[in-house]
Image (tube, coloured by chain):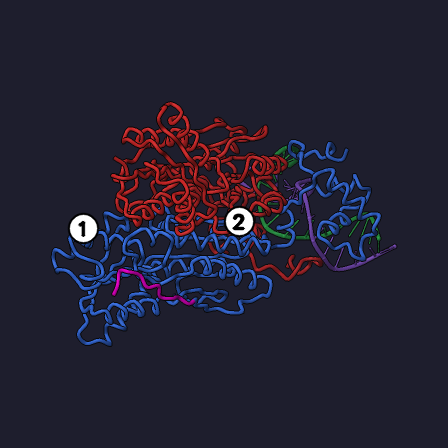
Chain colours: A red, B blue, C green, D purple
Amino acid sequence: MKKAQKPRSRAPSKRTTLEDVATAAGVSVMTVSNVINGKHTGAVGSATLRRVEREIRRLKYRPHEIARTLRLARSSTIGMIIVHESRLFMASPFVALMVTGLTNSLTERGYSLIVQGVQPRDFVNAAVLRRVSNDGIVAHISGSDRERTGFQKLLKTTSTPIVIVQDHQLIKLPDCCVINQEDEVGGRLLAELVIKGGARKLIYFKPRPDWPGVVGRERGIRAVVAAHGAVSLALVTTDDEGFAASQRSLRQYFDRHGMPDAILSSNDHLAIAAMKLVQSMGLRVPEDIAITGFNDFEYRKYADPQITTVRSNAYEMGFQAGMQMVNRLTEGRFANTDIVLPVSLVPGGSTR
Amino acid sequence: MKKAQKPRSRAPSKRTTLEDVATAAGVSVMTVSNVINGKHTGAVGSATLRRVEREIRRLKYRPHEIARTLRLARSSTIGMIIVHESRLFMASPFVALMVTGLTNSLTERGYSLIVQGVQPRDFVNAAVLRRVSNDGIVAHISGSDRERTGFQKLLKTTSTPIVIVQDHQLIKLPDCCVINQEDEVGGRLLAELVIKGGARKLIYFKPRPDWPGVVGRERGIRAVVAAHGAVSLALVTTDDEGFAASQRSLRQYFDRHGMPDAILSSNDHLAIAAMKLVQSMGLRVPEDIAITGFNDFEYRKYADPQITTVRSNAYEMGFQAGMQMVNRLTEGRFANTDIVLPVSLVPGGSTR
DNA sequence: CTGAAAGCGCTTACAG
DNA sequence: CTGAAAGCGCTTACAG
């Protein structure tokens, strides 16, 4: 056998190769390759075709994706990199749903997804950047403007197509598409709602470090507040988005500055923590104080009253990211380099 | 230049290769390869080393992972396949946290993770199975015994190491490790607790289709119930785990069979839906009826009273899966083929 | 300490 | 309709 004659091969691979099938079917490897890739129309005779197909089944042949990738110079694999302070980067439903949408859209179109979460300080060493193995990169980056700019510079060095979700281009990226949602519109809708409900002293409650989505929501709120003379806005931040920790941050603010009329939170879980806190202090929601969130994930239904919020379509954002990337890869360029997904107000019982 | 002479190459790749670096540094590709892979001790002179390192930086060389993979016959990539009825396979915090733990443990050890969610009918076509590209597969499979057996047979055909999470071997898999948690113990603890609290008419409330974890919890409950003469157990299932749908299923049962003393739910979100329902019917929790959940994820804190539950460590389960897989790959065999993670009771206000 | 060459498993331009 | 051969970018056994 040929195998035995190769002096430099490792332990004989038990995997079936194209050559094994070709030998068994009595044809060349090229013919088998054509059959595998559906290029047999007019190129492979029907008797040959049947023979090859039989041997493929009999030998349980599976194409070696890696060899194909090397030859074609495309891996049909996309890398997703998620920069997150915490190691639990998919504990956030937003991220989990986005990744789900991304995998699904890629899978539908024959692509695979490699996911990696990195903490800011490990970004430089991310496998996605260090070694070339993906056809493109989808990035979800948080951190300060300076940090994110640095990350985008590193992404640029890969010279692969890039889709950035929930952020904008901070440097000129030649082959890049950004996908965002109307965070500013959402902030605006919520601010208008609570002001119409009579609130004058507003708080925007958000986590630190900042994150483009959180900042966008804040921008919308500020715009509305600026348009109303008698309305004030204060900022309360929390380093830890956990239930107890965020309540502590808020409590500290109350002790020093008194109670607001409304707490606009940058997401639903902060809103629920806020609501439970003020309720435990004997205040009524929404009569004494209005509360709003952002995102509208399933767990919003667990607290009473249900938080007024804005619906984010995180799954759709991931799905779009995958579609845009695949289109870029097949067409040669991004058809659209700046996509903004709509949001919608979801009124609940936590506002009047 | 050599590039220009290759008649059959595609458009000249702009990517820097080992050969480019070698030419620039005036050494052979082998020397560069040795430097890249840290095999220069005693094999590459220090002057040569410096020269090569300078050219690597200057040319921004990044190793081509795919070529390396083909040569070494290992991709350092693990595929994770998640079988789920819904396309939103990571909407479940259990799955999201497990995947997070898995990526993190793989990343730490230089491996990458490809994630794919498939609906049962698409399992056969999963990329992970059809093409060879991973060093191993981690599988999270749900469905009936018959379905899961079929899936395990397909996994077997890949002849790669397999880690199964939250299930057992249904067929003989020669190169496989299973990782579970003490679901049965958890069910037992909860059943004992509510019975001690005075409950006699119990319900186990679970989703359909069945899922090994859900079944394990039920087994624990049944064991305890069987040991108490006066205690009865009924089953209520829901096809849809959504808030409203699960309440409808439960409501239907109540209308036909009356109210139980305790509702043991197979997870926290079903428990919260159950609690909200009985509260809306004017009953008090835990005075009139006891409620328990399972998992103890963050959102458990959002409902009042807080659900009594059992803590699952989904992140750890994923992390272990990654560690076991990497050990298998480096050592040649699984050190441990049956791992069970501990659970613990987390008492809340929903039981006496 | 350094290099020339084989080969991993594919695909494709070319020749028959 | 079919085949022989080059080459994708690496690593490594072997020879100097």
Taking the image as drawn, is residue B105 in sight? yes
The stretch in magenta equals B342-352
Pick the residue in front: A130 or A217: A217
For residue A132, above or below residue B169: above
Count the marks. Answer: 2
Q: On the same chain: label 2 and label 1?
A: no
User: How far across and down, in percent of the image, does residue A298 sit?
Assistant: 32, 45
Disc 2 marks a residue whose amino acid type is Pro
Q: Nearer the viewer, mark 2 or mark 1?
A: 1
Disc 1 is placed on an element classified as helix
The residue that disc 2 covers is A63
Q: Quadrant of residue A102?
A: top left
Residue at horizontal 46 percent and vertical 36 percent from the top: A321
The residue that disc 1 covers is B280
Pick the residue in front: A38 or A172: A172
Taking the image as drawn, is residue B156 in sight? no
Disc 2 is placed on an element classified as loop
Pick the residue in front: A127 or A104: A127
Q: Chain of mark 1?
A: B
The Cα atoms of the two marked residues, 2 and 1, are separated by: 58 Å
User: How far across and down, in percent of the image, does residue A208 sit?
Assistant: 48, 42
For this view, does B290 lie left or right of residue A96?
Answer: left
Q: Quadrant of residue B217?
A: bottom left
